[in-house]
Image (cartoon, rainbow, N blue to C red):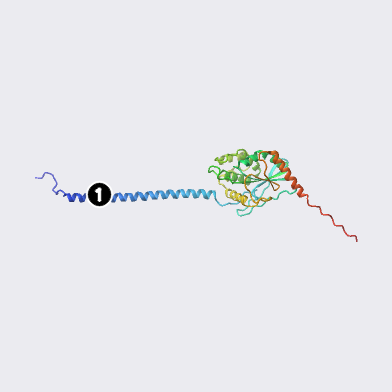
Amino acid sequence: MSNGGSNQPRPTRNQQREAAREKARELREAQKKRERRNKFLLVGGVTVAVILVIGLVIGVVVQNMKPAGPGPANMASNGILLTGVDGVVTPVETKSLPADADPIPTEQDDSGTVANIVVYVDYLCPFCGQFETTNGETIRTMVEQGAATLETHPLAILTNKSAGTQYSLRAANAAACVADTSPESFFDFNALLFANQPDEGSTGLTNDEIKGFVKEAGASSVGTIESCIDSKEFFGWVNNATERALTQPVPNSDLESIKGTPTVLVNGKQYVGSLTDPAEFQSFVLQATGEAFSESNSTPTPTPTPTPAS
């Protein structure tokens, strides 16, 4: 009569040890497989992450270093020229130049009766801000009265001095956008950027704040300018114009290149006086204009040759 127990003989000690070894071997193989699978997933995950980061960096670099397209209209010389008559400031209109075209130097008034004022500025440069605060309204009055012309060249020398936001480049691009489609508002927009100039080393103004000044300046094509600012349309042009200013001779002067901002020229002569003394700058303008007048009238008038008597 059966008692329900197993009829199989109990394994010997050797068999038990062998079974334990086999079980341990299986566990080790399973652990190795898990480790290989986890390593593959980890490497794959890191690779994907690296690829994503590289793609992001490349995208940012390409976006900010994209090749220059056509330059803005009304800045064929790399600057916008403003003249005036009867109290009204009027931009000199020029066509947009192709990306690979050389800038066309402005033909200055050589009569010696007009002050040809040319300024190279960076909108983050504190010294440029000082010069504008000191002399901006005086220059405006001179231009309105027809006693002077003003040619402004926006540069981006301090692009890396705004906590990574590239404010210098963004502001110069915005200035080019205004010159391109609403040049009659450039003088006021330029003044607003300096009146609200951020500190060097700060993050600078946001694009939305810059757009606010576009509206405040009374631009006639706000939507187009806002799109131009957001798309960074003239980033490449600004970079190229800045490089040209820093490496090539300055037109209508003896300067081999721009060494810093502000660089201010009056009838080709560089102003190196105080940036906070309006009287000193006004005196320089009168002197430079007077010298130009003397030079323009220094050529002797030809004496008519007598006709021999017949």
Picture coordinates of residue 133 (x, y %)? 65, 38
For the N terminus, the image quarter is top left
Q: Quadrant of residue 91?
A: top right
Q: Name the side, left or right, on which 2 lies relative to 124.
A: left
Query: Which one is in front, 267 or 191?
Result: 267
Picture coordinates of residue 43 (x, y %)? 39, 50
Q: Quadrant of residue 143?
A: top right
Picture coordinates of residue 201 (x, y %)? 55, 41
Assign a secondary structure to mark 1: helix
For the C terminus, the image quarter is bottom right
Q: Is residue 113 visible?
A: no
Q: Mark 1 = which residue?
A: 24
Three-letter code, disc 1: Ala
Residue at x 47% of width, y 50% of height: 55
Q: Which residue lies furthest to the front in this view?
A: 273
Picture coordinates of residue 123 (x, y %)? 60, 43
Q: Which residue lies furthest to the bottom in this view?
A: 310
Q: Which residue lies furthest to the right in this view?
A: 310
Q: Is residue 285 visible?
A: yes
Q: In which quarter of the image is residue 196?
A: top right
Q: What is the crowding at mark 1: few (fewer than 14 residues within 10 Å), some, or many (at least 20)? A: few
| Depicted 190 relative to depicted 22: above or below | above
Query: Which one is in front, 207 or 298?
Result: 298
Q: How many marks?
A: 1
Query: Which one is in front, 151 or 260?
Result: 260
Q: Name the side, left or right, on which 50 lies relative to 115.
A: left
